Image (tube, grey):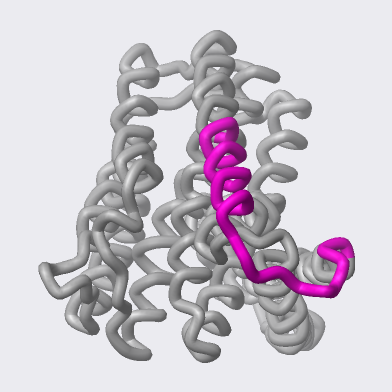
């Protein structure tokens, strides 16, 4: 089957649209942090992360309402591996990232615990509505902690912007809308190209769809690196993983119980945890280029294991 010209044009348009949207979204995030007088890392971990995870939330909710919540689970877990192993790995190839261990703190610990909790839930092969509700409860507690931290930071801040925060929020929303549309274009075009080469539908979902819904994070992280705002990139990826692991999966399971064979989701959970452990900075607070190579190798291992698991089922 020949590759469609429409599919190629869709992919090229997605790249151009993502560049424009990413620039607008990053300006919105940085401007909102200044206007609201809160640390950029906190805004990235909350507002930016939630916004960039909206494609996964949409996919999981629609799939669950259609009686197929497994699609949402696969997208959420696959996107988490893409976020850390692929996106952070690519970001590190541009140069080392400096971040203190204490800055990772509670969010990083929770990101490590969530895969273990998800694995425990799937020991009987199903994530039930009750377990989904528990994930949402943990999400609400985490959100409360973020809000308290934000209010505390704002109380002690001295610098503020004269611009209304809504201006930056609207700017960020315009950028996000462009990123989401770019992600849909990319998924459509790349799926058509993959199908033209006879690639299996399951593999397309585990790779193309996960990368497509992670396009907002990809553009945000790379632009943040190029603009010298590493804290925004780190916060966005970490917050997005937490949002996927708690809110996205929690909502999908609450709508409809999710069939989750341990063998099928094992690669995503295992490589997800491995990728997170590779983010622990050294004593100097640096995560070097070598970690980037290891992270990209981890992503390649995830793809290979996912294909093998799919063939075994």
Assess whether residue 159 is covered by the magenta stretch: yes
Q: Quadrant of residue 8?
A: bottom right
In-front residue for pair 15/278: 278
Task: Give the image location of residue 255, x and y in percent.
Answer: 69, 19
Residue at image point 52% right, 69% down: 232
User: The C terminus lies in which quarter of the figure?
Assistant: top left
Q: Is residue 132 left or right of residue 175?
A: left
Assess whether residue 160 is covered by the magenta stretch: yes
Task: Give the image location of residue 18, x and y in percent.
Answer: 71, 80
Residue at image point 34% right, 74% down: 89
Residue 312 visible here: no
User: Residue lying furthest left in this view?
Assistant: 283
In-front residue for pair 293/113: 113
Chief secondary structure of the magenta portion: helix
Q: Is residue 205 left or right of residue 58?
A: left
Task: Give the image location of residue 248, x and y in percent.
Answer: 60, 36
Q: Is residue 97 left or right of residue 30?
A: left
Task: Give the image location of residue 277, x and y in percent.
Answer: 21, 54
Residue at image point 63% right, 76% down: 193
Q: Is residue 202 left or right of residue 8?
A: left
Figure disc tally: 0
Instruction: State which region is magenta.
Output: 143-166
Q: Is residue 130 above or below residue 2?
A: above
Q: Is residue 223 above or below residue 100?
A: below
Residue 265 visible here: yes
User: The N terminus lies in which quarter of the figure?
Assistant: bottom right
Residue at image point 70% right, 28% down: 64
Q: Quadrant of residue 293?
A: bottom left
């Amino acid at each position: 089957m020949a590759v469609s010209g429409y599919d190629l044009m869709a992919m090229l348009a997605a790249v151009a649209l993502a560049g424009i949207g990413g620039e607008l979204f990053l300006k919105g995030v940085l401007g909102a942090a200044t206007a609201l007088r809160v640390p950029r890392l906190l805004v990235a971990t909350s507002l930016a992360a939630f916004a960039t995870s909206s494609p996964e939330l949409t996919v999981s909710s629609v799939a669950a309402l259609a009686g197929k919540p497994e699609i949402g689970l696969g997208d959420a877990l696959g996107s988490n591996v893409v976020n850390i192993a692929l996106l952070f790995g690519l970001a590190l190839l541009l140069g080392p990232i400096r971040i203190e261990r204490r800055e990772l703190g509670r969010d990083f610990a929770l990101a490590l615990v969530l895969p273990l909790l998800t694995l425990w839930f799937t020991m009987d092969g199903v994530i039930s509505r009750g377990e989904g509700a528990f994930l949402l409860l943990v999400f609400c507690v985490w959100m409360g902690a973020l809000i308290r931290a934000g209010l505390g930071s704002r109380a002690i801040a001295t610098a503020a912007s004269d611009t209304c925060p809504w201006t930056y929020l609207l700017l960020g929303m315009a950028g996000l809308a462009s990123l989401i549309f770019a992600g849909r274009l990319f998924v459509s075009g790349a799926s058509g190209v993959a199908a033209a080469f006879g690639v299996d539908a399951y593999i397309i979902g585990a790779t193309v769809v996960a990368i497509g819904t992670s396009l907002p994070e990809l553009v945000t992280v790379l632009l943040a690196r190029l603009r010298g705002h590493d804290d925004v990139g780190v916060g966005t990826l970490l917050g997005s993983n937490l949002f996927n692991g708690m809110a996205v999966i929690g909502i999908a399971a609450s709508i409809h119980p999710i069939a989750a064979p341990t063998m099928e989701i094992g690669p995503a959970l295992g490589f997800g945890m491995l990728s997170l452990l590779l983010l622990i900075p050294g004593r100097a607070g640096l995560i070097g280029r070598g970690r980037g190579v290891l992270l990209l190798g981890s992503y390649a291992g995830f793809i290979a294991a996912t294909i093998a698991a799919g063939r075994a089922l």
